[in-house]
Image (tube, rainbow, N blue to C red):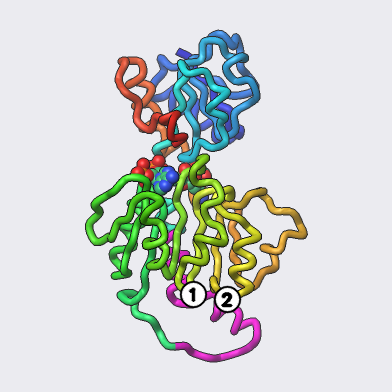
Amino acid sequence: MTLLFKVDDARGRIWKSLFEHHAPDIEVRVWPDIGNPLDIRYFAAWQPPRQLHERFANLEVVFATSAGVDQFDLDALPGHIKLVRMLDPGIIQGIVEYACCAVLSLHRQFPLYLQQQQARCWQDHLLTAAAQRRVGVMGLGNLGRAVLHSLRAFNFQLHGWARSHKCIDGVQCHAGSDQLETFLHQCDILICLLPLTDETRGLLNARTLDALPKGASLINLGRGGHLKEDDLLQALDSGQLSHAILDVLNDEPPSPGHRFWQHPRVWLTPHIGAMTAPQSAFEGLLANIRRHQAGEPLQGLIRREQGY
Ligand code: NDP
Ligand code: OXD
């Protein structure tokens, strides 16, 4: 069984050595050292090459090295090839850290205090208790649930929204497009942790941003494609939103002239919410390969009709 990684050299070396150590029966090759393409049964990458299945005629499973799989063209991938997303405890930890850091920064008005510092202004503002602050998470999958679980410790009022109804302790859950507006009405801080699909593309737009309470803030950790950037700028400029923290953008990096770079009420990070580390992801990937070899269902298998 041969597994081909298309990753950077440093990570390629780590993946290779982990497999040599713990699963020597699986031969690991690292792009561009493909060898005989007919040997390749498993392929793992963040960005797939063009004509993947044509290059590797015996390909059986594609493992995304990311939790999101929107960079793969599902329509172009023949039905017999499975696509699996990365289930890495390191990704969950990274997103939880980022989300808590961003929520607490907004809750404690750090953007305002940073602006005040730049203006040499020493001015305090009344504190809002966490119990009075409503935080909502769009997407209640592995990441959204972990974030909500961690935010509970601070005593925020928590809301969640997903496609199907969920019961999560301490969280008021909403489901489907019928309940989207009710959910949005109750989010002083909104976190997007949705996968990017045909249904969720552009979901953060003038209409949905307008449904948030006046002065709300947005944290986008999903994908740039969820957000209509011009609509966000308009909402910030009108005061409908007070701040946005964006880890993902339509164009990464944004053009040098993009308004987000200099916007006083936008904080940008370069898609670092989480990063897959071979050390934390290895166990789950190997377990999935073993499941496939045993003919068992794969964890994190993408349902083609849903796109996530
Ligand atoms: P999951 O597949 O575990 O969860 C997805 C959640 O989104 C589910 O709760 C699902 O609802 C919900 N959802 C999907 N479509 C809709 C819809 N149309 N309407 C309402 N809810 C919907 O994904 P993860 O939690 O693992 O990851 C989520 C996303 O986070 C990734 O796809 C990726 O885009 C992003 N991400 C970003 C990172 C970063 O560094 N910024 C790092 C890792 C991931 P239901 O439960 O009903 O199916
Ligand atoms: C992911 C990401 O989806 O890094 O894992 O964005």
- x, y percent for residue 236: 60, 70
Q: In this view, does 222 lie above or below 73?
A: below
Prevailing SS of the magenta stretch: helix
In terms of image quadrants, where is residue 11? top right
Query: Is residue 69 rendered to the left or right of residue 301?
Result: right
Q: In this view, does 49 lie above or below 138?
A: above
Q: Is residue 72 above or below residue 55?
A: below
Is residue 18 visible in the rendered image? The answer is yes
Instruction: Give me the disc on residue 239.
Output: 2
Q: Residues within 10 Å of mark 1 (few under 14, many from 20)?
A: some
Residue flagged by tag 2: what amino acid is it? Gly
Of marks 2 and 1, which one's residue comes earlier in the chain?
1
Measured Cα–Cα span from mark 2 to mark 1: 7 Å
Instruction: Give me the disc on residue 214.
Output: 1
Q: Quadrant of the C terminus?
A: top left
Q: Answer yes or no: do the residues labelled 2 and 1 have beta carbons within 8 Å?
A: yes
